[in-house]
């Protein structure tokens, strides 16, 4: 398959240098950054800056499937522990379709929601790598960017901001982003284990700073049981 292969890199955008116009009051205003609610974003053109201000996971989707006019489709996803290289989760859309061809029925709409179950040890990992493979339709995709935010209730556990860059039309693209896992206390880990699926994430995808896809997930962390 032709297309662009993204290089492995650290997830998260590096902040630029301070501009000459910055002063103490401006820096204080940035430090006291406001939050926005999902309701306040309803009906507006949502920007990357907007979703970074959300203080909890969304209840609804912030765009419709029809917003994906670029026909971006995710075909493979893999998570691995960067220390042991163990593959923790992998799904391949092509393999799934071959095993479940659907008896000639119309191709179903891709799901925008995933429910994960991980062993509790996942929360103790230091770094993980997430490999994504996706295809795009017959339009060029400029400034393709993902912002993914993980919450437990109203606490932000992790925020990832990754720039895929430019994708040529009708291409297959693969990249892996590597990120540090949040350092949690034993009490925090126990709370996540005791409240399955209250850990949630939103994945927002932008093209030219316009929201075109919104996927959601929730998570349960399973403690080992003695046999």
Image (cartoon, rainbow, N blue to C red):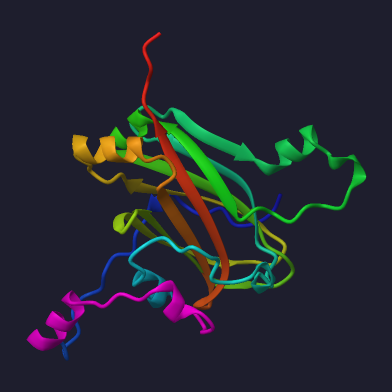
User: At which x and y percent is residue 98?
Assistant: 79, 36
Q: Within the magenta stretch, is there residue 192?
A: no
User: At which x and y percent is residue 50?
Assistant: 40, 76
Can you see residue 47?
no
In this image, 172 relative to 104: left or right? Answer: left
As drawn, the residue found furthest toward the top would be: 227
As drawn, the residue found furthest toward the front would be: 195
Can you see residue 140?
yes
In this image, 219 relative to 195: left or right? Answer: right
| Segment tinted magenta in the rendering | 23-47
Q: Which residue is drawn at 44% across and 35% down?
A: 80
In this image, 86 relative to 133: left or right? Answer: left
Q: Which residue is drawn at 25% across and 73% down?
A: 16
As drawn, the residue found furthest toward the right would be: 104
User: At which x and y percent is residue 13?
Assistant: 33, 64
Establish if 165 lies above or below 220. Answer: below
Q: Nearer the viewer, residue 36 or 12?
A: 36
Q: Nearer the viewer, residue 51 or 57?
A: 57
Establish if 178 lies above or below 170. Answer: above
Establish if 54 lies above or below 225. Answer: below
Q: Which residue is drawn at 47% across and 52% down?
A: 7
- Position of the C terminus, as image quadrant, is top left
In this image, 19 relative to 158: left or right? Answer: left
Which of the 4 image quadrants contains residue 138? bottom right
Query: How many dots with numbers?
Result: 0
Q: Residue at x 90, y 40 (%)?
A: 103
Which of the 4 image quadrants contains residue 137? bottom right
As drawn, the residue found furthest toward the bottom would be: 21
Q: Which of 141 and 63 is in front in this view?
A: 63
């Amino acid at each position: 398959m032709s297309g662009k292969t993204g290089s492995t890199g650290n997830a998260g955008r590096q902040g630029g240098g301070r501009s000459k116009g910055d002063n103490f009051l401006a820096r204080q205003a940035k430090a006291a950054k406001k939050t926005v609610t999902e309701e306040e974003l309803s009906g507006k053109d949502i920007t990357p800056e907007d979703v970074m201000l959300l203080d909890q996971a969304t209840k609804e989707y912030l765009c419709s499937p029809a917003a994906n006019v670029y026909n971006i489709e995710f075909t493979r996803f893999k998570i691995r522990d960067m220390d042991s290289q163990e593959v923790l989760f992998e799904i391949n859309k092509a393999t799934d379709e071959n095993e479940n061809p659907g008896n000639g029925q119309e191709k179903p709409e891709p799901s925008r929601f995933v429910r994960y179950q991980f062993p509790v040890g996942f929360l103790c990992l230091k770094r993980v790598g997430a490999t994504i493979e996706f295809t795009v339709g017959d339009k060029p995709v400029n400034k393709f960017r993902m912002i993914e935010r993980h919450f437990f209730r109203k606490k932000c556990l992790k925020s990832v901001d990754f720039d895929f860059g430019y994708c040529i039309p009708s291409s297959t693209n693969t990249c892996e982003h590597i990120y540090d896992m949040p350092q949690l206390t034993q009490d925090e880990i126990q709370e996540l284990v005791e409240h399955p699926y209250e850990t949630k994430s939103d994945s927002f995808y932008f093209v030219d700073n316009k929201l075109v896809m919104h996927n959601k997930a929730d998570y349960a962390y399973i403690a080992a049981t003695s046999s």
